Image (cartoon, grey):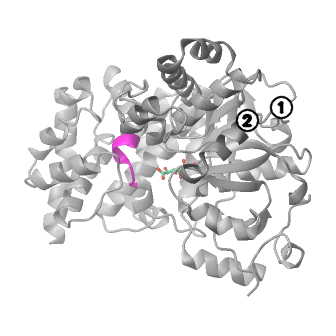
Amino acid sequence: MKRLNLETLPTVTAERPPYDPASVQVGVVHFGPGAFHRAHQAAYLDALAAIDPRWGICGVSLHSAGVRDALKPQDGLYTLAILDEEIRYQVLGSMREVLVAGDSIEAVFERLVRPSVGIVTSTVTEKGYCLAPDWTLDFNHADVVHDLANPTAPRSFIGYVAEGLRRRKAAGLAPFVLIPCDNLPKNGERLKAAVIAFAARVDQGVADWISANLQCPCTMVDSITPATDDALRARVAEVIGAEDAWPIQREAFTQWVIENHIHPNGPDWAAVGVTLTDNVPAYERAKLRLLNGPHSTLAYAGLHRGYESVSQAMNDPELAALVRDIMLKDVVPLLEAPAGMDLPAYCEAILKRFRNPAIKHFLSQIAWDGSQKLPIRILSSLSEALARGNDISRLCVPLAAWMRFIRMKAVRQEAITDPLAAELLALGGSLKDEVADVKSVLQLRAVFPDSLANDPRVIAGIEAAYADLLKAEAVAA
Ligand code: CS2
C-alpha cells in the first residue's frame, strides 16, 4: 500500500489540508510532539495555516526518535481520526519537521534563534518541567544538574529554552513567546520562574532580560487523546487508502485557553477557536479538578475493579456515581466558574465525554505518573475541602486506590511508569495488605505534604477507603 506523503496526498480519502503544506514555514518550535500535541495544538495550527502560513511546527523530541522516523517519510503529514458521534478523518499538514534533540542539538538551537520562529510550545508532561514539590526549579534534578554543567548541550526542556533565549538575546532578537501546554496549574508562571532560575545560574544579565521580556502565558488545554495502537493504524489505512505510520485519535471536543499576552504580529488565535482571557486560573482549576481528577479516580478505582478503559469504568454504576458525586458535590463548591461557564453543565458534558463509546481510552495510560498528577488533581481539592470542614470521604477513594495500585504492581512485579517508580515499587513491596499501609504511603513527602499526611481526618478517610478496597479484594478472591 502507498504511504501517506505530499505526493500521495491528493489521492487519499480523508479531509485534506486546504492549503499547500510545503508552503508553510516553521514559526513554532514544539517540545514533546506526542499524541496530545498532534491531536490538539497541531490541529489549531493546521487551521491557522489555512489563513496564515507562518506558523508551521518544528517538533523536537527530547527522548525518542519514533515520531521523527514515522513522520519523515510522510513529509510530516499524519491523520487525525476524530472518533465521536460523528467520525472524521483529517490529514494535518502543520507539522513541518521533527528533530530528535540529542541527535541535532545545533539544529534545535538554529530553529530557536530564527527570527521567523516566534513561538515555543511544550507538552513534556508534568515531570518535564523539572519542578520540586514547591513548584520551583528542582536544582537536584539530574537533568538540571547536567544542563547547568553543559548549558550548550542540554537534556531538559528548561535547558533548551534557557540557552535558546540566551542566544536570542546575544543575536539582538526579541524572545519567542513561550506557551506551555501541560496540565500543570499556573503553567506559564511556573515555567517562566523555572527558566529565570536556571538562567540566573548561568548569567544574571540573561535572567534579568528574560524576566523583563519573556511572555509566557498560562494555558488550559483539553481534548481526550488515547494512545495510538495498531487497530487505529489498520483502520486509518483502510479508510484513507494509504499507510500512515502514526495516526492520532481523539474525541471531537477540543479547547485551548491562553492568557492574554503581547505578541506583535503574532497569530490570530481567536480566528481558529482559541479563547484568550485574563482568567486562565478559573478554566484551569475547573479542568484539572473536574476532568483530570475524575480521570485519575476512574483510572485507579477502575483498574482495581478489573476494567481496562474509561468508558468501561463509566458503565459501572457505582464508579459512575462516585465520580459524579466527587465532581458535583465535592469539587464544584470549591471552584469559581469562568465567566459564562455553568459548572454543573460542564460536569455533565465531561461525564458524557467519558462515556464516548467510539474511543477506547486505557485506564493504564491515565494511571501513569500518579505521583505527579495526584497532588494537582486530587490533593488540591482535598486541602481546600479540609479547610472548609467539608466531608472528604469520597476524595480519599482515588488516593486509597492509588495505594492499592502501587501494592498490586509490586506484588505482580510489573513496571510502574512514574518518575518515582523505584521508590514506589520498593514501598509497594513492603506493604502488608492491611489498613496500616496507609500511614506508610503517606510518608511519601514528594506526594503528601506534612499538613495532609499528619491530619487525622485524612488518615481516617484514606484508611476507611483502603479498608473497603481490601474487603472487595477478599470478596473477589
Ligand atoms: C488524562 C489526560 O492521561 C491523563 O492523565 O487525564 O491526558 C486527559 O485525557 C487530558 O488532559 C484531556 O484534555
Q: Nearer the viewer, residue 232 or 82?
A: 232
What residue sits 57% from the left and 45% below the top? 123
Distance between mark 2 and mark 1 Cα atoms = 9 Å
Q: Which residues are magenta?
A: 367-373
What residue sits 28% from the left and 51% below the top? 421
Residue 62: x percent and y percent? Answer: 53, 49
Mark seen at residue 457 = none
Residue 11: x percent and y percent? Answer: 87, 79
Q: Nearer the viewer, residue 252 or 328?
A: 252
Residue matched to label 1: 266
Q: Is residue 344 above or below residue 236?
A: above
Describe residue 36's horizontal placement relative to residue 71 as left or right: left
Describe residue 12's horizontal placement relative to residue 212 as left or right: right
- Which sits earlier in the primary sequence, circle 2 or circle 1? 2
Location of the N terminus (image quadrant): bottom right
Q: Does residue 265 show up?
A: yes
Q: Are marks 2 and 1 in contact (CB under 8 Å)?
A: yes
Q: Quadrant of residue 415?
A: bottom left
Q: Nearer the viewer, residue 349 or 414?
A: 414
370 within the magenta span = yes
Location of the C terminus (image quadrant): bottom left
Residue 381: x percent and y percent? Answer: 40, 32
Residue matched to label 2: 119
